[in-house]
Image: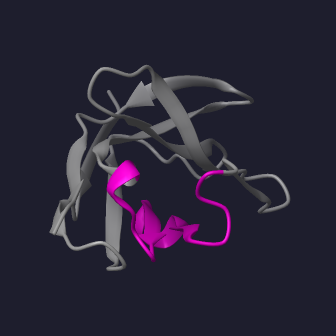
C-alpha cells in the first residue's frame, strides 16, 4: 500500500514563500509521474504542477508558472513544491499525487496553505 504524506503548509503573508514536501512510503514511485494539485474553498480541484519521471520534464499551471517549482528526490522518495511570491489566490489545500501518465492513483491527505496579511 502506497502512502503519500504532505507537509510544509501554513500561514504566510502575500509575497512570501513556502516549500511543501510529499513523502512516499510503501513502494518506490520513481517511475511514476508526481504532481501537485490544489482545491480552494468553493472551487474544484485544479492541477498545479507535474514532474514526469521519463525525461524529468515538468509542467505548470499558467497561474503558478514562474513562481512555483516542482522537484523530486527519488533517493528520499520525496517530491517538493517550492512556492514563491505567494498571492492570496494561492490559498488552498494542496495535494500530492502519483500515477502513470495523467491518471493519478495515489493521493495524499492534503496540507493547508493560507496566504493572508
82 in magenta: yes
Instruction: State left or right for residue 61 relative to residue 107.
Output: right
Observer-nearest of 1 and 81:
81
Which colour assignment does the render follow? Answer: one colour
Observer-nearest of 76 and 50:
50
Q: Quadrant of the N terminus?
A: top left
Whether 15 is drawn above or below 68: the answer is: below
Q: Looking at the picture, how far across and down is residue 116, in whole percent?
A: 19, 62
Residue 104: name its quadrant.
Answer: top right
Q: Looking at the picture, how far across and down is residue 94, in whole percent?
A: 34, 44
Q: How many marks?
A: 0
Q: Looking at the picture, how far across and down is residue 29, in whole percent?
A: 53, 46
Q: Looking at the picture, how far across and down is residue 46, in whole percent?
A: 52, 31
Residue 68: name its quadrant.
Answer: bottom right
Which residues lie in the magenta part? 63-89
Observer-nearest of 109 and 49:
49
Instruction: State left or right for residue 117 relative to residue 38.
Output: left
Whether 24 is drawn above or below 20: the answer is: above
Observer-nearest of 87 and 106:
87
- Which residue appears at 20% of the width and 55% of the height? 114
Instruction: State left or right for residue 21 relative to residue 56.
Output: left
- Which residue appears at 24% of the width and 54% of the height? 113
31 in magenta: no
Q: Residue furthest front?
A: 117
- Which residue appears at 39% of the width and 52% of the height? 90
Q: Quadrant of the C terminus?
A: bottom left
Amino acid at each position: 500500500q502506497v502512502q503519500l504524506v504532505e507537509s510544509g503548509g501554513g500561514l504566510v503573508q502575500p509575497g512570501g514563500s513556502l516549500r511543501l514536501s510529499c513523502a512516499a512510503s510503501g513502494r518506490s514511485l520513481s517511475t511514476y509521474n508526481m504532481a501537485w494539485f490544489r482545491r480552494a474553498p468553493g472551487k474544484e480541484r485544479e492541477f498545479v504542477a507535474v514532474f514526469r519521471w521519463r525525461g524529468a520534464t515538468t509542467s505548470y499551471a499558467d497561474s503558478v508558472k514562474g513562481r512555483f517549482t516542482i522537484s523530486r528526490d527519488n533517493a528520499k522518495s520525496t517530491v517538493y513544491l517550492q512556492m514563491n511570491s505567494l498571492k492570496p489566490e494561492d490559498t488552498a489545500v494542496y495535494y500530492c499525487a502519483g500515477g502513470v501518465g495523467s491518471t493519478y492513483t495515489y493521493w495524499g491527505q492534503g496540507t493547508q496553505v493560507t496566504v493572508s496579511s
